[in-house]
Every structure is written in structure tokens, then in C-alpha cells.
Amino acid sequence: MGGLDAKKAVLDLPLHTIGFEIEELSPKRVAGRMKVTEKCCQPFKVLHGGVSALVAEALGSIGAHMASGLQRVAGIHLSINHVKQAEVGDTVTAEATPVHVGRTIQVWEVQIRKIIDPLNPGNGALLSSSRVTLLCNMPVPDNAKDAGLTLKKFPAVKESITAMLKLRLQSRGSQVPYFEQALGLRFCEHVKPADLMPFKVLHGGVSALVAEALASMGAMIASDLKRVAGIQLSINHVKQAELGDMVVAEATPTHVGRTIQVWEVQIRKIDPLNPGNGALISSSRVTLLCNMPVPENANDAGVTLKKYAKL
């Protein structure tokens, strides 16, 4: 792996694990692509909705982190709608752009598309559309003071953030030379800014992936192992879990119909002294379409689940 590729790999470890490659980094746009492999598919050989949610939360967080001048941000809400599917072997692109950039709250839109024409990748079929809401300028844990060093290694990121901060200070009546001397270069070179990942806390996209996965398995069992597909996920992040914590997740049905099911998923951090009463980490609602046709290459998709499910 080359030097630049190695840097990008550590920008967001969960993204790197599923094979996602970041191609553009700026406070106004974060974009990349990945090839759909079996690692990121559900049993029916199509892109896992939870993986799309992970990508959306990750790119929105990286963009918000840069737009806030490399201060720490944290996702508090993700809403994603799945409209089409991608199959094993397809290449998908993802693009995150800001809808609102404030000092306390940012909102980013993320679109994931399947490349139809390799000569015109920007015109792909829309797979999912997301809104990510993030809390900004948060305190940094003592064990993650150097978390922003990775992004500072990208010259384009450094230049764009410096230019953005200059513009902000100019709009407030400050002089650019003073900024360069007192804040700009010092900020970019010497101060260890907060980073969203790795902050040694649970990635919000991983929570979304868990929620969509558990709800999908539950809905599949509730529909007598017929094919289901998530069409909407809404997740609220309310507390954090740190590296080494144990978390539990539970999915329960809110509505089980022949065509539509709705599941609620709660993720909690275990208290070793009272494991049944853990602190709530996130709460989700997953809406799924049921009794869908099964692809010929996935007729045995329910076999594994049947071995473990309490039917």
C-alpha cells in the first residue's frame, strides 16, 4: 500500500474494513467509492443497508470535522432511505455535501449511487439518500488528543481549512496577517486538533449497521424466512461507548405485516454490576419491505439463519 493509500486507510477504520476508498476530502465535499463484495452484502447477495448507513455516517462525520476546523464532532441522528439495490461486483460511489454548517450543529446529505456507465460515473442510479445531523465543537477525550493528525497529513485538507478559517475571521473583522501569525499556521502545524475517528468511542455508523442487521434478521424470521429488505432507518445516538466497553443490542417488532415490518433496536452499554440496566447508547427504527422475490443465486439464504433461530 502506497503512502497516500496508507493515510486514507486510517481515516476511518470501519470504512477501510469494508473496502471503501476515499477519493476527495474537503470541507465542502467528501467522496469515494467501493466495489460491492460478499463481505458487505446481506444473505441475498445485495449491498447490506447497514453498510450504506455506515458509509453515510462516516462521510458526513469526516466532512463536518473538516468544516468545523478540525474540531471534534459526533453524529446525533442519521436518517437513510434505501431506494435501489446493488449486487456483488457492482461499483458504488458516495458523496457527502453540507446542508447546514453551524458552530453547534451541522447537517450533511449523503448520496450513494451505483455506477451504470463507467464513462459517466457521476450519473449513476441512486441507491440511498441520507441526512446526518452532528453536534460540533465537543470536548476531546484525554486519550485521543492526537486523533486529528491523520487528516493534517493531506495538503489539500490543510489548505482548504486554512482558507476557510481565514474567510471566517475576515467576516468577523479580523485581519488576515494576524490570523496567519496567531492562529493559522500554529493551528495547522502545532495544535493537536480533535478528530472524529479514531476517538476511541463507538462509531455511529457501526451502531447503524448493527441496528439494520438485527432488524433485518428479525423481520426475516417473522416472515417465515422470506426475503426482506430495509427501506428506511432512523437512528438517534444519545451516549457514547468507549474502547473496551461491552455493548448489547436488542431488536423487537413494532409492526409485523405481510408487506411492511417495523422494528425498534436499542443498543446499551453494559454495567458489570447491573447488566440488565445498561445505559442507552442509541435507539433506532427500521422499516422493511417483506415477501420480496429471491434471486436465483440466493435460494439458500435462509438456511444458516434457520439453524440458530428459535422458530
Image (spheres, grey):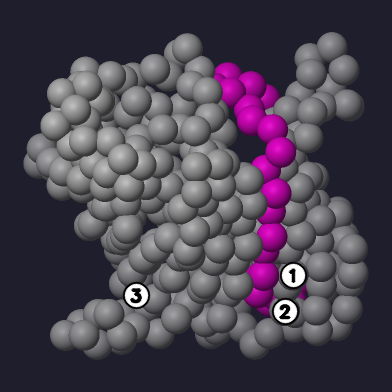
Asked whether 213 falls inside the magenta stretch, the response is: no
Where residue 113 appears, as percent x and y from the top left, is: 39, 76
Residue at image x 73%, y 73%? Answer: 288
Q: Which mark is residue 287?
A: 1
- Does residue 277 appear anywhere in the picture? yes
Quadrant of the snapshot with the C terminus = bottom right
The residue under label 3 is which amino acid type?
Asp
Residue at image x 67%, y 25%? Answer: 246
Q: CA distance from mark 1 to mark 2?
A: 7 Å
Residue at image x 31%, y 40%? Answer: 173
Is residue 166 left or right of 64 when viewed as pictured?
Answer: left
User: Which residues make up the magenta segment?
Assistant: 224-246
Q: Which mark is residue 90?
A: 3
Compared to residue 44, the image places residue 171 above or below, namely above
Front-most of residues 19 and 309: 19
The residue under label 1 is which amino acid type?
Thr
Q: CA distance from mark 2 to mark 3?
A: 22 Å
The residue under label 2 is which amino acid type?
Leu
**Extreme left residue here?**
2
Residue at the spot of label 2 = 289
Residue at image x 48%, y 77%? Answer: 127
Question: SS at mark 1?
Answer: strand
Where residue 183 appears, as percent x and y from the top left, is: 24, 25
Is residue 156 left or right of 49 when viewed as pictured?
Answer: left
Callout 1–callout 2 Cβ contact below 8 Å: no
**Quadrant of residue 213 in the image?**
bottom right
- Does residue 55 appear anywhere in the picture? no
